[in-house]
């Protein structure tokens, strides 16, 4: 004897989205991971958790290229509106994320702040500074 046939992913997915205007965020109403991204079970025998934003992209825009991640242009991790997303490399996603931080460093120099390797982040995450300028300052003290 078998149980009921599981609902298709798309059907389960859309029942968990607060749809709004095309240009507004579509909020994920179900489970979210520790970093605030929506998540949904793949379904059936597949017990994996899938990123809700990735499912939304694939349902409405198509496959996400190999080695690409989804960047939330709206910076709302709970948003599943593909108009607010763009597939990018992980490096580009990290660069964009640093640039959008409310605590983004004040630019007091001409060094490249878009490269995370050039930005020193305090261990508590509360402060950022230019690595080159920090090194230069420490050498002159």
Image: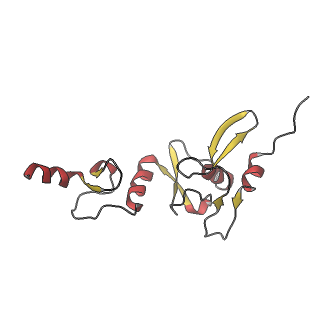
Left or right of 89? Residue 29 is right
Tag count: 0
Protein image colouring: secondary structure
Position of 128 with respect to 74 (left or right) is left
Q: Quadrant of the N terminus?
A: top right
> Which residue is the extreme one toward the left?
140
| Image location of residue 86, percent across then percent down | 53, 56
Instruction: Write the residue at 55% across / 45% down.
Output: 65
- Of all residues, the one furthest to the top in this rendering is 1
Task: Provide residue 113's location: percent of width, then percent of height.
Answer: 30, 57
> Where in the figure is residue 61, as x and y percent of width and height?
64, 55
> Does 139 appear above or below 81?
above
View extreme (front): residue? 124
Q: Residue at x 88, y 31 (%)?
A: 2
Q: Quadrant of residue 109?
A: bottom left
Query: Which image quarter: residue 49?
Result: top right
Which residue is drawn at the image coordinates 32% and 52% (left, top)?
115
Outermost residue, right side:
1
The x and y percentages for residue 140 are 8, 52
């Amino acid at each position: 004897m078998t149980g009921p046939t599981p609902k298709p992913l798309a059907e389960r997915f859309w029942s968990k989205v607060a749809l709004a205007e095309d240009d507004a965020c579509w909020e994920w109403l179900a489970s979210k991971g520790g970093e605030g991204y929506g998540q949904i079970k793949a379904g059936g025998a597949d017990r994996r958790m899938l990123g809700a934003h990735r499912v939304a992209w694939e349902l409405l825009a198509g496959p996400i290229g190999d080695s690409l991640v989804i960047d939330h242009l709206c910076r709302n991790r709970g948003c599943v509106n593909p108009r607010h997303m763009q597939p990018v490399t992980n490096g580009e996603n990290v660069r964009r994320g640093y640039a959008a931080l409310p605590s983004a460093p004040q630019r007091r120099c001409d060094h490249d702040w878009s490269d995370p390797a050039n930005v020193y982040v305090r261990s508590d995450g509360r402060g950022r500074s230019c690595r080159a300028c920090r090194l230069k300052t420490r050498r002159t003290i």
